[in-house]
Image: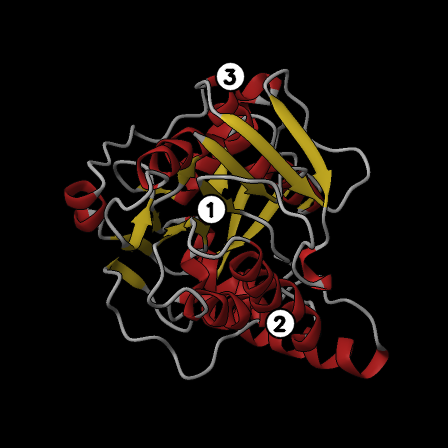
Amino acid sequence: MRIAVTGASGFIGGAIATALADDGHRVVGYGRRPVGWSHPSGTYRVWDLARGPLREPDRVDAVVHCAGLSDPWAGFERALLANRGGTRSVVRTFPGRRIVHVSTSAVYDAASASVQVAEDARMPERHLSAYAATKALAEAELGGRDAVILRPHLVYGPGDPALLRRLLAGIRGGRLLLPAAAEVPHALTHIDNLVDAVRRAAIPFGPRGTFNVTDASPVLLSDAIGELLERRRVEARIVGIPTPAALRIAHALERTARLTGTRPVLTRDTVSRLGYERTFDLAAAREHLDYRPRETSFEGAEHW
């Protein structure tokens, strides 16, 4: 097939574009960066989706939409333009084409634990971040179309510098302070599992709908973080702070940041997502996409 991948200059989009090209598909990768994704069987084009549709789009059979603004502290208007506006640009550029929209578990209610949440869970009236709110609005742009919406949680794997960088930034004096000491179940999403879900979803006129996408089984977040740090030979001990206390601290930091025009070192959205259980029902993906994910693995993390 001929497949377009937006956000190809980023971690998730780049991994998906490469995997699809390796499968033998003709891939056009789109990104905002002048120099981005490359592959012998692919083409890279610069496209800032926030600026609107392409005037001369490539002819494709399907689109995998990965582009978006994930900054939890981004202003609402900026996030809206990138996430909902970017999705509108994709829909208008490729009318009638199969769209696989890589969304996020952040659209679910972050104010309490997510325990085996299914896709039909009631959406919160108010999200804790503009990112979550605008990703939910972006999903609404795909109603009635030949589309699949995938909701992964905490995507990790080779090529992702962000997870380790965030962890290292939080280490002080050999201690890593985390809500609830990260002793909470989380269903992470290895990039290979997400790629597999995309492969199964990209078939034109195949099953439509919204699907949770994670690894096969939840793990304790503390175990996952500990293994990752150990494999990277980083010595740090996880120290816990009660999640309610961490939320109060984050709220105070957010208020100060708004007054001073700075960026908070911690947000309520981040605390809530780490300090409560985040597990998701995979029954729909297993049944309709024949999704068969592998277990969480940090094999090879020494070289990420």
- At a point 68% along the width and 63% down the height, the residue shown is 52
Q: How would you rate the neighbour count of disc 1 (Cα within 10 Å): few for under 14, some for 14-19, many for 20 or more? A: some
Tell me: 119 left or right of 194: left
Element on which disc 1 rests? loop
Q: Is residue 271 left or right of residue 294?
A: right
Q: Earlier in the sequence, mark 2 or mark 1?
A: 2
Q: Position of residue 26 (x, y in %)?
A: 52, 26
- The residue at which mark 2 appears reads as 80
Disc 3 target residue: 300
Does residue 207 show up? yes
Circle 2 sits in a helix, a strand or a loop, which is it?
Answer: helix
Q: Provide residue 188's location: percent of width, then percent of height.
A: 39, 42
Q: Callout 3, which amino acid? A: Gly
As rendered, which of 166 and 22 lies closer to the eye?
22
Residue under the point 78% across and 42% down = 33
Q: In the rendered structure, which disc, 1 or 3, sits on the residue that comes first in sequence?
A: 1
**Above or below 303: residue 294:** below
- Residue at 49% across / 35% down in the picture? 3
The residue pinned by badge 1 equals: 154
Can you say which quadrant of the picture contains the C terminus? Answer: top right
Q: Amino acid at mark 1?
A: Leu
Can you give x and y, in whole percent of width and height, for residue 60 in the image? 50, 39
The image quadrant that residue 8 belongs to is: top right
Could you give the CA–CA distance between mark 1 and mark 3, rounded to whole angstroms?
Answer: 18 Å
Q: Is residue 188 left or right of residue 52?
A: left
Q: Which of disc 2 and disc 3 is earlier in sequence?
A: 2
Task: For marks 3 and 2, give the CA distance.
Answer: 36 Å
Contact (CB < 8 A) between labels 2 and 1?
A: no
Given the image, on which type of amino acid does mark 2 rest? Leu
Whether residue 44 is situated above or below residue 222 in the rendered picture? above
The residue lying furthest to the right in this view is 260
Viewer-proximal residue among 174 and 219: 219
